[in-house]
Image (spheres, rainbow, N blue to C red):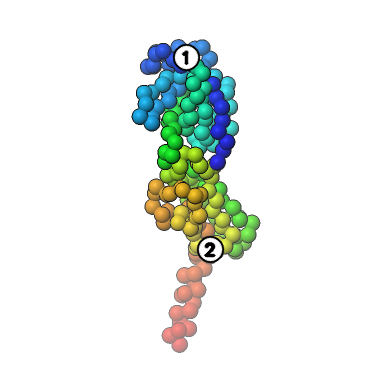
């Protein structure tokens, strides 16, 4: 799990599109903190810091301690919007966290062991079916990623979500037999199999 990061914000008096545009003109990013049965809080974040945090990676699985006018709120980014042309942040949604709360997060799948994969050595192609999975995890132990080792995979073999040892307290929200990675046979091998079967047929009749 990533360490809790500190970020400062200022409270906004007004919400809505007009107020958000005014915040952007001041070189800030409008955001909102909601959840945990409390009223939503409209805030403004520093533009440069927010942009750096988003593009540094793991933004949506990092817990932030947001200081708003002297009050600290722990929250998790749930979504952010980027300008479709200039690719800079225009809004961020934060989910307020309560102690002991379980939340759904999308966690990347890191594939390891490619250099030892028997199927790849035999000419197969490694195919990553799912690059991320959704998990239900305690808010204080969000994993940065889960690992799927393909070291023992042969051609035609796959790794499913239920083959992965999930972090303590984590549960899959999708089907447990979800395919994550598979090794696909090369096209030449697929073509050879029918040809071998045809050649073997006359011999069997004889």
Quarter residue 2 falls in: top right
First-in-chain label (2 vs 1): 1
Is residue 39 depicted above or below 14 in this figure? below
**x, y percent for residue 76:** 47, 32
**x, y percent for residue 141:** 51, 42
Find residue 13 and name its label: none
Q: Is residue 89 visible?
A: no
Q: Dot 2, how many residues are within 10 Å of its Cα: few (below 14), some (14-19), or many (20+)?
A: many
Residue under label 1: 23
Q: Is residue 129 left or right of residue 123?
A: left
Q: Is residue 60 visible?
A: yes
Residue sitting nearer the eye, 7 or 29:
7
**x, y percent for residue 96:** 43, 30
Query: The N terminus is located in which quarter?
Result: top right
Q: Is residue 168 left or right of residue 35?
A: right
Q: Residue furthest bottom?
A: 206
Q: Residue at x 41, y 13 (%)?
A: 13
Residue sitting nearer the eye, 158 or 69:
69
The reply to whether callout 2 and callout 1 are in contact (CB within 8 Å) is no
Is residue 141 depicted above or below 155 in this figure? above
Q: Residue at x 39, y 16 (%)?
A: 15
Residue sitting nearer the eye, 153 or 42:
42
**x, y percent for residue 169:** 46, 48
Considering the numbered disc 2 on the image, is that residue within a helix, a strand or a loop? loop
- Mark 2–mark 1 Cα distance, whole angstroms, equals 55 Å
Residue under label 2: 155
Instruction: Judge depth for marks 2 and 1 and give the one in front.
Output: 1
């Amino acid at each position: 799990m990533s360490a809790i990061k500190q970020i400062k914000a200022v409270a906004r008096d007004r919400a809505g599109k007009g107020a958000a545009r005014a915040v952007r003109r001041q070189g800030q990013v409008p955001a909102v903190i909601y959840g945990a049965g409390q009223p939503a809080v409209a805030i403004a974040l520093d533009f440069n810091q927010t942009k750096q945090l988003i593009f540094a990676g793991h933004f949506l699985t990092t817990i932030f301690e947001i200081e708003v006018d002297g009050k600290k709120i722990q929250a998790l980014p749930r979504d952010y919007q980027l300008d479709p042309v200039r690719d800079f942040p225009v809004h961020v949604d934060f989910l307020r966290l309560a102690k002991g709360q379980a939340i759904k997060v999308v966690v990347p799948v890191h594939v390891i062991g490619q250099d030892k994969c028997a199927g790849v050595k035999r000419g197969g192609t490694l195919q990553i079916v799912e690059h991320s999975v959704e998990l239900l995890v305690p808010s204080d132990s969000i994993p940065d990623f889960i690992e799927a080792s393909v070291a023992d995979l042969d051609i035609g073999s796959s790794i499913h979500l239920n083959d992965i040892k999930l972090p303590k307290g984590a549960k899959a929200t999708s089907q447990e037999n979800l395919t994550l990675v598979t090794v696909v046979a090369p096209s030449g091998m697929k073509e050879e199999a029918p040809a071998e079967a045809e050649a073997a047929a006359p011999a069997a009749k004889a």
